[in-house]
Image (cartoon, grey):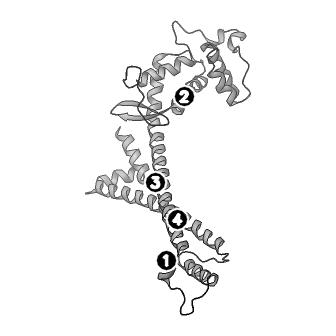
Amino acid sequence: MEEQLLEFAAKALNMSQEEVKETLTQDGGLEQLTQAYAAHVKTVKDSGYKAAERKVNKAWEDKLKADFDLQSDTVGTALLDEVQDALTQRQPKPETKELNEAQLKKLPYVMQLEKKLQEAETSAEEKWKKVLAEKEEAWQQKELFGTVKESALGIIDTLKPVLSQDPAKAQAQKNVILRELEQNYRFMRNGDEIVLLDKETGERLDNENGHALRFEDVVKKHTTSYYDLQVSEQRSSSARKPDEQAPSVAMPKNKAEYVKLLSDESISAEDKMKLVEAYESAQG
């Protein structure tokens, strides 16, 4: 666990594990690492906000140039000066004086543009925050799945499904179950326990009695949906006859057909196991 925490800290701080260890041995080392991480997060957020801000600014600048037919590389407040000149040329000039900045800001068209700009800035900031939150969640899930994978493989080995005698093929068969878990669930740690969450909503998944689904039960469900469990000494795959080694269904032509066959409830678990062996072998 200590080694995993050290690896996590090194990745989060973009430092080597040795640098993290050395810093922690110094007086105030933990505070240094905490400040370094805070600075890193602020840099990421600032850069994202500036990119979103520039995108919004470019949108209203392009709109102004198009509306007033301005062939100009001017941006920002300087562009408003050019717009003011364009407005002045389009409207009858007052006999006494030209529009000043205060008068320009009172024009309905300019006020409407300012309102749209404020709305666009708010929308861009909300979208940026959502994207950042999604990226952080995806990163956390990727880190956590290493633990999920290790626990799932331990449960699979305990169940003793009937797998290929070839270690590489057996691992490929186990990977089918791991992909099922990764594609259908999100995960959360509660101490040493792995909590299953809905893939879309992030809500905790409960059984029919309202209790949290047990990770072990879900792994077993996916394992037995593809493979039979050993009930006696497993026969050597080399002792099978050729027709026993091949599935009764035709070899799929692509990944989509492969996935469809695996989800077909009319195909037996034994034929699914043979199909997985044959398909994974053909894929190299």
Q: CA distance from mark 3 to mark 1?
A: 33 Å
Compared with 197, 268 (above or below) is above
Q: Earlier in the sequence, mark 3 or mark 4?
A: 4
Residue sticking out furthest to the bottom:
96
Q: Can you see residue 280?
A: no
Residue closer to the observer: 144 or 63: 63
Q: CA distance from mark 3 to mark 4?
A: 20 Å
Q: Earlier in the sequence, mark 1 or mark 4?
A: 1
Q: Earlier in the sequence, mark 2 or mark 1?
A: 1
Tag of residue 244: none
Question: Label 2 is placed on what type of residue?
Answer: Glu
Residue closer to the observer: 111 or 72: 111
Question: Label 4 is placed on what type of residue?
Answer: Lys
SS label for mark 3: helix
SS label for mark 4: helix
Location of mark 3 (residue): 129
Tag of residue 180: 2
Decide: few, some or many residues near mark 4? Use Cα within 10 Å; few <14, some 14-19, many ≥20: few
Location of mark 1 (residue): 106
Decide: few, some or many residues near mark 1? Use Cα within 10 Å; few <14, some 14-19, many ≥20: few
Say which of marks 3 and 4 sits in front: 4
Q: Are marks 2 and 3 in contact (CB under 8 Å)?
A: no
Q: Quadrant of the C terminus?
A: top right
Compared with 24, 260 (above or below) is above
Q: Earlier in the sequence, mark 4 or mark 2?
A: 4
| Quadrant in the picture for residue 140 | top left
